[in-house]
C-alpha cells in the first residue's frame, strides 16, 4: 500500500510541477542520484572490507570467516544498489511517459525575458529575438532573426537515448544457432534508457563524432517448451518444469557505458556572416563501437496454475551463474533521431558456456 501511495504522490507531483520542470534537468537529476547511490554503496563496502582485513590481521577471525564476511557484505550492498536504483529507474520511466504525453516540456520550451528581448538556452548556446513594440505587428514576426552565440564553437551536445527490441542468444558465435535457440524470439525483449554526449573530433564543424554515455538495460529471455533455468552449483541448466507454465522469463538488469564513433551526414549551414553552423541528427547517421558494463541484478519469473487451478506467480532471485561484468560490440544506422540498433555481447552470458546475448531493435536519440 505504501508503494502505491508513493507512486501516486510522485505522479501527481510530476504533473503539478511540469510547467516548472524540464525533461533534460529531471533526467540529469535522476542520473546524478543513481551515480550517488552506486558510489555510496561501493564506499560503504570498501569500509567494511578494510575493517574485516583489520580483524584478520589482529587474529580476531580466520581466513575462512573473513571471506564469508566479505561475500555477505558484497551481496548486501549489491542488493542495496539494485533496490535503490530500481526506484530511480521507475521514476525515469514515469518521466519518459510524461514526456511522451506532453506533460513535461523540453528546455527549449521555456523563455526568459530581458528588456526588449526574449532568450532561451540549450547547452552552451543562447538564442534571443527582438520583441519590442515595433515588432508586435504579425506581418513583421516573420522577419525576426535568431542570433546565435558561439553556435559553431559548441563541440559537445547531449541526447536522451531510448531503445527497444528483441533478445536471443548465439552458441559458439554462430548466427545459424538462432534456428535451434531455446528462447522465444519475439517475446524475449530488451529495453534501454540512457544519456549520451556527442563530441565532435575536430574544433571546426565536421561529420565525425565520438559518442559516449551511460545507460540502463532490461534484458528479458523467455524459454520455450515449458522450460526454466535451474542452478546446479556452478552450472545453470535448462530443465522442464513439472507444472504447465504460462510464463518463464529470466530478466537481468545491467548498467552499461556505451562508446561509438558516429558519422553524421547532416549538412552544415553557413549564415550571412559567413560562419559555419554545425548541424546534427538531420540526416543519415552511422555509429560503430561497443560497450562495457556490469549487471545490477537477475531474477526468474514463473507463472502457472496448481492442481486446484489457483494462479501462482513465483519470483526467484539469483545470479544463475551469470557473468557480472559484460562487454561487447554495437552499431546503429538510421535517419535523424531513429536508428536500427544491433548489440552483441563478446563475453558469455553464463559462466563456463559459449552462450552470448544478441539484441536487435529500434533506437531513438533525442536532442
Image (spheres, rainbow, N blue to C red):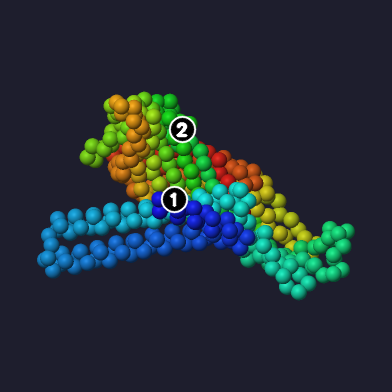
Tell me the SS state at disc 1: helix
**x 71%, y 54%: residue:** 268
Mark number, residue 307: none
The answer to which of 220 and 62 lies nearer the viewer is: 220
Q: Is residue 305 visible?
A: yes
In the drawing, does residue 54 fall left or right of residue 118?
Answer: left
Residue 301 picture location, percent across and down: 36, 38
**x 65%, y 46%: residue:** 336
The answer to which of 288 and 4 lies nearer the viewer is: 4
Q: Is residue 173 above or below residue 148?
A: above
The answer to which of 353 and 250 lies nearer the viewer is: 250
Q: Which residue is mark 1?
A: 4
In the drawing, does residue 50 fall left or right of residue 309?
Answer: left
Number of residues whose C-alpha sits closer than 10 Å to that of mark 2, classed few (under 14), some (14–19) or many (20 or more): some
Q: Which quadrant: the C terminus?
A: bottom right
Q: Quadrant of residue 139?
A: bottom right
Q: Is residue 331 visible?
A: no
Q: CA distance from mark 2 to mark 1?
A: 28 Å
Q: Is residue 294 above or below residue 247?
A: below
Q: Which residue is mark 2?
A: 187
Depth-wise, is mark 2 or mark 1 nearer the camera? 1
Amino acid at each position: 500500500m505504501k508503494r502505491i501511495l508513493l507512486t501516486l504522490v510522485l505522479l501527481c507531483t510530476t504533473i503539478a510541477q511540469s510547467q516548472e520542470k524540464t525533461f533534460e534537468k529531471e533526467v540529469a537529476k535522476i542520473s546524478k542520484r543513481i551515480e550517488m547511490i552506486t558510489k555510496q554503496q561501493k564506499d560503504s563496502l570498501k569500509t567494511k572490507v578494510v575493517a574485516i582485513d583489520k580483524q584478520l590481521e589482529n587474529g580476531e577471525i580466520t581466513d575462512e570467516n573473513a571471506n564469508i564476511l566479505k561475500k555477505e557484505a558484497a551481496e548486501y550492498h549489491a542488493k542495496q544498489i539494485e533496490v535503490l536504483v530500481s526506484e530511480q529507474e521507475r521514476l525515469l520511466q514515469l518521466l519518459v511517459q510524461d514526456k511522451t504525453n506532453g506533460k513535461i516540456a523540453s528546455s527549449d520550451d521555456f523563455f526568459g525575458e530581458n528588456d526588449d528581448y526574449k532568450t532561451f538556452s540549450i547547452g552552451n548556446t543562447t538564442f534571443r529575438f527582438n520583441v519590442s513594440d515595433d515588432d508586435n505587428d504579425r506581418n513583421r514576426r516573420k522577419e525576426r532573426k535568431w542570433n546565435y552565440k558561439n553556435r559553431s564553437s559548441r563541440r559537445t551536445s547531449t541526447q536522451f537515448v531510448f531503445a527497444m527490441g528483441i533478445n536471443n542468444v548465439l552458441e559458439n558465435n554462430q548466427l545459424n544457432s538462432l534456428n535451434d535457440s531455446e528462447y522465444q524470439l519475439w517475446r524475449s525483449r530488451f529495453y534501454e534508457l540512457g544519456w549520451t554526449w556527442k563530441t565532435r573530433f575536430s574544433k571546426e564543424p565536421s561529420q565525425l563524432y565520438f559518442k559516449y554515455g551511460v545507460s540502463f538495460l532490461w534484458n528479458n529471455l523467455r524459454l520455450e517448451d515449458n522450460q526454466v533455468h535451474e542452478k546446479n552449483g556452478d552450472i545453470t541448466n535448462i530443465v522442464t518444469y513439472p507444472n504447465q507454465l504460462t510464463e518463464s522469463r529470466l530478466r537481468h538488469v545491467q548498467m552499461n557505458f556505451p562508446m561509438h564513433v558516429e558519422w553524421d551526414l547532416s549538412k552544415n549551414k553557413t549564415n550571412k556572416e559567413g560562419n559555419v553552423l554545425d548541424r546534427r541528427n538531420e540526416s543519415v547517421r552511422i555509429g560503430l563501437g561497443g560497450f562495457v558494463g556490469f549487471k545490477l541484478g537477475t531474477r526468474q519469473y514463473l507463472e502457472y496454475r496448481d492442481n486446484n487451478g489457483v494462479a501462482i506467480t513465483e519470483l526467484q532471485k539469483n545470479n544463475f551463474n551469470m557473468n557480472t561484468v559484460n562487454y561487447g560490440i554495437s552499431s546503429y544506422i538510421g535517419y535523424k533521431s531513429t536508428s536500427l540498433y544491433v548489440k552483441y555481447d563478446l563475453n558469455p552470458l553464463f559462466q563456463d558456456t559459449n552462450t552470448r546475448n544478441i539484441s536487435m531493435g529500434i533506437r531513438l536519440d533525442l536532442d
